[in-house]
Image (spheres, rainbow, N blue to C red):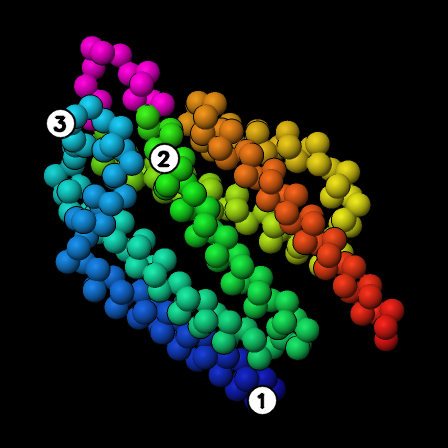
Amino acid sequence: MAFLEDSFLSHLIELRNRLIRAVAAIVVVFLCLMPWASDIYDLLASPMLQSLPEGTKMIATGVITPFFVPVKITLMAAFIIALPVVLYQAWAFVAPGLYAHERRFALPMVMGGTALFITGMAFCYFFVFRTVFHFIASYAPKSITVAPDIEQYLSFVMTMFIAFGVTFEVPIVVLLLVKTGLVTVKQLREARRYVIVGAFVVAAVVTPPDVTSQVMLALPMCVLYEVGVLIAAVMVRRQAAGTASI
């Protein structure tokens, strides 16, 4: 009993130390970026500003909004930059309890999932935002002045980043489903038509009410699903070949 308590306590101490290191990494990066918080916000707002009429700027309706919105965005940037350290701390805590074959599978999944999430955010920033903002601005009546509030813009950007980041995780989800035996590659291929319909339904819910952004979310989701199925098929064949050789 005492051994179990000591073991549990040591795990709690290890978890606390790993969390402290992860948070410290984020804080250090955040403090280093703070002098450029306004520039970081301007970079994030660039797709919107390019779609606005010449001479028009975004507005801040809150008293402290001009300070807190750049700080929030800088914190988000710090988390993304410090993500390798955060993931390493999580991996270092979990890895000792995994079998060798589980470690070989889990590490690529974690790194691949992170890379795909960041890729989804980049796709959203460089392609989706510019297309969507220009599309919306082109339909604005001549009688109004388009001047988005920076807090609402931050909320919109975060929603879109999360939507596209999660969307790009589809291959990882497919691989995990096959690896755990919940579904087979054959079942995934047979479910293709339902996935396509579901992709457009999800896109219609999480994106603005325009066809352009919905298509730009649904199409990558469908393509990434097919990529996941192909990789899963290769993985299954390799496993079967390895078992046969034994």
Residue under the image location 44 percent in, 72 percent down: 89
Relative side of 128 to 138, left or right: right
Q: Residues within 10 Å of mark 2 (few under 14, many from 20)?
A: many
User: Is residue 237 among the parts visible in the rendering?
Assistant: yes
Distance, label 2 to label 3, CA atoms, is 20 Å
Q: Is residue 137 magenta?
A: yes
Depth order, front residue of 173/62: 173
Q: Is residue 221 left or right of residue 208?
A: right
Identified at 65% across, 49% down, the residue is: 228
Judge left or right: residue 1 versus residue 245.
left
> Where in the figure is residue 191, as x and y percent of width and height?
73, 37
Q: Which residues are magenta?
A: 135-147
Query: Looking at the rendered structure, which numbered label has been put on residue 129?
Result: 2
Q: Please tell me whether mark 3 or mark 1 is closer to you in this view.
A: 3
The answer to which image quadrant residue 112 occupies is bottom right
The crowd level at tag 3 (other Cα within 10 Å; few <14, some 14-19, many 20+) is few
Mark 3: secondary structure: loop
Q: Which residue is tagged 3?
A: 55
Residue 224: image x %, image y %? 59, 44
Q: Which residue is mark 1?
A: 3
